[in-house]
Amino acid sequence: MSTTKPTARRTRVESGIYRRADGAFEIGFRDSGGRQRWRKVDGGIRAARSALVEARAQRERGERIAADPRLRFDDAAQAWWEARVVKLRATTQSAYGASLAHLRKPNAFGGKRMSDITPTAIARFVSTQEASGLKGWTIKGQISVLSAIFTYSGRHLGLPGANPVSLLDRVERPSSADQKEKRILNGDELSRLLTAIEPEYRLIFEVAAETGGRLGEILGLTWSDISLRDQTVSFAFQLDRAGARQPLKTARSRRCLEVTPALAARLAEHKRTSGHFAGHDLVFMSRSGRGLDHRNVGGRILSRAVDRAGLAAVTDRHGSVVQTAPTFHSLRHTHASALIAAGWDIEEVSARLGHANVAITQQIYVHQFDAARRSEDRRERLSALYG
């Protein structure tokens, strides 16, 4: 009587990584207690390698975590929030909270087991959010929060497998092609806007136009951040919307910037006449000695100046906006665009804006860099064609 050799449960692909009979990958490793563990991995060979690296890192850290196959998204999200988000500033908590509200909806991931949230389910969520009219950057924020929850759950709640967000294909990820158009002012428009600002607030906008600083960063400046001798402005703090001065989050966001002698002179005159010139005094404050309100400076004051300067939003005959009105952030975009046009390289621009990395600068200003890099070449080729 002949015998049939049973099919192997798994076959070795490479060290620590196996393929199961059903085609899925599985990793084999020993935990910190020396016990052999097997774990199925959703995704391909790269996902299996990533999961194996993480499992071995957990062993080296001495972590001995039992997986909970019943772990639900709401519980994981709450644990992540209490361990990570409560330590962050109020504005970041608010942004994460808004994203989490979408993720927790019953038709999204609320009430679901973490093991049931697959790349396919996430891709379906992205498509649903896009169909509802949400912008790509908003959905990206939601997916970023989802990824953070999975990462935390894998490290601290014993959730096995790779982060399913990392397994999304490029076409399954939310597109950022629909990001809001940046309003960049030309020289005449910038001059008109600054002239239209009420005199007691004009220096705030002049500092923004020359440094590319964010509104909170400029309102958070104290005289210890200003070197009139060296003609520099240092951004290390920001004034939040509650009026509290908070340190900037990353090392790259904390920066010392050169300014022109003309701006340094206007700052010196403001220091002389303001009556508040101690190192700890805010450079820009109200008559009561408090920090200025974001909504007043970036909203009402700017809005009045935009109208006076004739820079309101432009609509076509159908009422669609074809050119947005300038916002305070438009001064930052205008400054960056001017630097790029003047030949500053991407690293210099990124450092001056305080971006976390050069990739962010490239992503936001890719068209400006492309135009600055290639416009002269195109002009020469046109001249060769048409004389």
Image (cartoon, rainbow, N blue to C red):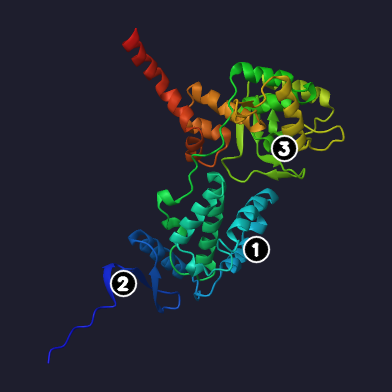
The residue most toward the right is 288
Instruction: State the residue in front, 37 or 7.
Output: 7
Left-right relation of 192 to 286: left
Q: How far across and down, in percent of the image, does residue 33 sit? A: 45, 78
Residue 283 in sight in this render: no
Give residue 196's quadrant in the image. Answer: top right
Give amino acid for label 3.
Answer: Gly
Question: Label 2 vs label 1: CA separation?
Answer: 39 Å
Q: How far across and down, in percent of the image, does residue 242 sit? A: 76, 45
The residue most toward the front is 318
Residue under label 3: 220
Callout 3 secondary element: loop
Query: Which residue occupies 27% across, 70% down?
Result: 12
Please rate how many residues cluster around mark 2, counting C-alpha atoms within 10 Å: few if below 14, some from 14 to 19, many from 20. few
The residue most toward the left is 1
Question: Does label 3 or label 1 sit earlier along the sequence?
Answer: 1
Give residue 250's quadrant in the image. Answer: top right
The mark found on residue 238 in the picture is none
Residue under label 1: 82
Give residue 103's quadrant in the image. Answer: bottom right
Query: Which residue occupies 65% across, 63% down?
Result: 82
User: Looking at the rendering, in which quadrant would you find the N terminus?
Assistant: bottom left
Callout 2 secondary element: loop
How many marks can you see? 3
Give amino acid for label 2.
Answer: Asp
Please rate how many residues cluster around mark 1, counting C-alpha atoms within 10 Å: few if below 14, some from 14 to 19, many from 20. few
Q: How far across and down, in percent of the image, does residue 387 sit? A: 34, 7
Left-right relation of 222 to 274: left
Give amino acid for label 1.
Answer: Glu
Question: Label 2 vs label 3: CA separation?
Answer: 59 Å
Residue under label 2: 22
Q: Are marks 3 and 1 in contact (CB under 8 Å)?
A: no
